[in-house]
């Protein structure tokens, strides 16, 4: 369970209505099979001991007595099994019959949770009144809707069936009190649209409450006298379906995945999700600390949607947000035009596409866009021609200002040889370009639009007082992997020469073009120097959003990029990411305004508040200590 992962399962075993002996055997077998498979939390259906469709038979003492005995037998079956199990049974507490979720582990009953909203089943079951205790066999156990079962960072609450759909079904209070997993034994009948409703509500509630929802539904072995059931089982985490057995897809609805409790706890901590008021009772239990084999999907590109249709929709939304934000800033600053440096690279291309949209929203003439190309020592014909082609096709005005002479003069002023191609040689070009843009903006009454993306900002891959500065930067929350998708999306919408230019830009190596080319080709490739952007964006997303430990990032990256990068390569660039992220904060502390479009942003005004002189040793030590896990 290192890194906060808990293997969970929802299953609906074979059933015979009112045949407690048969059902008990099936439940016990499911527990044993699950434990042998490394499952640590098993959720079984509502009223699984008897079947949910017994009707008035629930009130018969023989069935009630058999149900009580079954609970003891099922509890005994978990002895020496490292698992916690939640299942449904009808139980007497005093003279009142309740529809209950029984929680057991290692041969012990941890507690019993009664169904809060009994609805039509009030004919058989009572609605719980006060929290208290229940006597089962020779023992007395916690009873009520206020129970949270805790083991380290795993905090499990439970409710039953239609409590999921109730506005105050109990999950809210439990999650506000710290629960991060809600087990939901259910016997929700299948009708047209019910499956969509279950998915919608479980996603919405798990996102709102920063928890995981585990729903185990009754299977089709239930009586079909008036209804049918379909083992629609769902494992949902923070608004995302991790695993689902769709209606009638499988008789037993076997659904398995791993819950990331540490991620859920981080979200709760960030949101300060705590409740003062309704008290809860925390019931401790123990599980062995073992490695959890991960089967859940790990997104290689966390900033990108799972499918093309969704990504196209998201791309349009992002471009619209960027353009409207820039349009607002142009108007608010009384700017007459947008001034930016166009290089034929991805970032400046995205900036141009956004500026063109902003002008269209404002009803301005695109001819007033001032795109400045500033060739120098490293500029290649390929990037320059692409920049010209795209600007011309989009209707922007291109101004060419060769900065070679001014850079040479400056290098001479400080006594730096032109043959010494060190960082001074490179940065002098970047700073000269920004000076030209700023002066030109002053002359035209314009606003300098920045082009640097989120990945460059995270890594500090920008020259201080040069390309990390502008008057407004619409790209500041767009990582490099997403920049590619946005440019590709626009390429799919355009035709002719503009489309060709965009496709060639996408095919051009990412480079600052600050070193002289060889035979007209780019020799300075950014990813050779700072590492693959797909790895850095993978690290950035979970590091910034969820506070993942470096060893967890390393573990997940090895799984996500298996077969693409060797482990030592991933480790190398993760160390580089950590060092650069910490040491380059000083650049982020004075970065320009820019629109936040996603959940990860590094703006010092709200996206990331971090001292510029903090050290990174705690993170590197954690990685080194746990890299072999």
Image (spheres, rainbow, N blue to C red):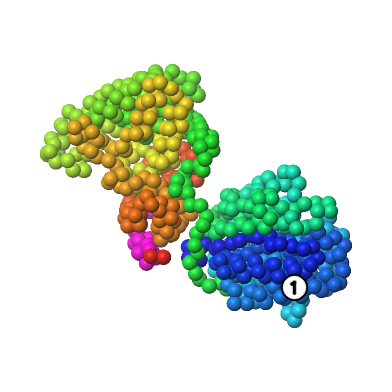
Q: Is residue 525 on the magenta stretch?
A: no
Quarter-of-image position of residue 131: bottom right
Q: Is residue 570 left or right of residue 235?
A: left
x, y percent for residue 298: 48, 52
Residue located at (47% from left, 26% from top) = 493
Q: Residues within 10 Å of mark 1 (few under 14, many from 20)?
A: many
Residue that badge 1 annotates: 70
* Residue occupying the point 43% across, 44% down: 603
Decide if residue 139 is on the left or right side of residue 526: right
Residue shown at 73% from the left, 79% from the top = 139
Rendered image quadrant of residue 336: top left
Residue 433 locus on image (x, y percent): 27, 32
Q: Is residue 543 above or below residue 278?
A: above
Residue 88 appears in the picture as rendered: yes
Q: Nearer the viewer, residue 608 or 283?
A: 283
In this picture, which residue range is highlighted in magenta?
Answer: 607-627
Closer to the camera in the image, 521 or 141: 521
Task: Tell me the residue at 42%/46% (across/down).
Answer: 602
């Amino acid at each position: 369970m290192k890194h906060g992962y808990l293997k969970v399962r929802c299953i609906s075993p074979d059933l015979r209505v009112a045949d407690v002996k048969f059902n008990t055997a099936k439940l016990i077998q499911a527990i044993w099979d699950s434990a042998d498979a490394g499952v640590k939390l098993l959720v079984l259906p509502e009223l699984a001991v008897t079947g949910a469709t017994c009707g008035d038979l629930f009130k018969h003492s023989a069935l009630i007595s058999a149900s009580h005995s079954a609970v003891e037998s099922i509890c005994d079956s978990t002895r020496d099994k490292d698992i916690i199990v939640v299942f449904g049974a009808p139980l007497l507490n005093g003279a009142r019959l309740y529809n209950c979720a029984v929680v057991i582990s290692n041969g012990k009953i941890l507690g019993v949770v009664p169904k809060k909203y009994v609805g039509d089943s009030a004919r058989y079951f009572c609605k719980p009144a006060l929290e208290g205790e229940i006597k089962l066999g020779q023992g007395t156990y916690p009873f009520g809707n206020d129970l949270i079962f805790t083991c380290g960072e795993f905090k499990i609450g439970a409710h039953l069936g239609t409590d999921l759909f109730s506005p105050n079904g109990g999950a809210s209070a439990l999650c506000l009190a710290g629960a991060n997993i809600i087990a939901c034994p259910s016997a929700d009948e299948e009708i047209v649209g019910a499956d969509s409703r279950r998915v919608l509500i479980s996603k919405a509630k798990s996102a709102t409450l920063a928890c995981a929802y585990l729903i185990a539904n009754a299977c089709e072995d239930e009586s079909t006298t008036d209804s049918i059931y379909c083992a629609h089982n769902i494992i949902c985490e923070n608004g995302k379906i991790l695993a689902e057995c769709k209606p009638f897809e499988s008789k037993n609805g076997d659904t398995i995945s791993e819950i990331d409790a540490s991620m859920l706890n981080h979200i709760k901590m960030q949101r300060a999700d705590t409740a003062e008021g309704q008290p809860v009772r925390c019931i401790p239990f123990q599980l062995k600390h073992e490695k959890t084999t991960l089967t859940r999907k790990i997104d290689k590109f966390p900033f990108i949607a799972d499918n093309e249709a969704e990504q196209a929709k998201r791309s349009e939304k992002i471009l619209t947000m960027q353009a409207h934000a820039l349009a607002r800033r142009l108007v608010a600053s009384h700017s007459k035009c947008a001034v930016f440096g166009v290089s034929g690279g991805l970032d400046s291309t995205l900036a141009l596409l956004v500026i063109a949209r902003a002008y269209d929203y404002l009803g301005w003439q695109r001819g007033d866009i001032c795109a400045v190309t500033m060739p120098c020592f490293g500029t290649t014909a390929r990037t320059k021609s692409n920049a010209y082609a795209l600007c011309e096709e989009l209707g922007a005005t291109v101004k060419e200002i060769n900065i070679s002479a001014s850079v040479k003069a400056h290098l001479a002023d400080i006594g730096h040889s032109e043959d010494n191609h060190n960082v001074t040689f490179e940065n002098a070009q970047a700073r000269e370009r920004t000076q030209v843009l700023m002066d030109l903006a002053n002359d035209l009454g314009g606003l300098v639009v920045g082009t640097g993306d989120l990945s460059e900002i995270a890594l500090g891959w920008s020259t201080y007082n040069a390309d990390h500065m502008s008057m407004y930067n619409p790209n500041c929350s767009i990582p490099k992997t997403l920049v590619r998708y946005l440019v590709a999306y626009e390429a799919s919408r355009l035709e002719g020469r503009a489309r060709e230019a965009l496709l060639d830009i996408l095919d051009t190596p990412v480079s600052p073009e600050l070193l002289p080319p060889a035979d007209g080709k780019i020799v300075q490739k950014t990813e050779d120097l700072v590492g693959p952007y797909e790895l850095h964006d993978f690290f950035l997303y979970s590091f910034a959003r969820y506070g993942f430990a470096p060893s967890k990032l390393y573990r997940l990256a090895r799984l996500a990029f298996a077969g693409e990068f060797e482990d030592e390569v991933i480790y190398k660039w993760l160390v580089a990411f950590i060092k650069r992220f910490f040491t380059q904060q000083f650049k982020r502390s004075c970065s320009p305004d820019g629109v936040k479009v996603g959940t990860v942003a590094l703006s010092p005004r709200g996206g990331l508040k971090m001292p510029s002189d903090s050290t990174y040793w705690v993170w590197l030590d954690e990685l080194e200590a746990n890299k072999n896990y």
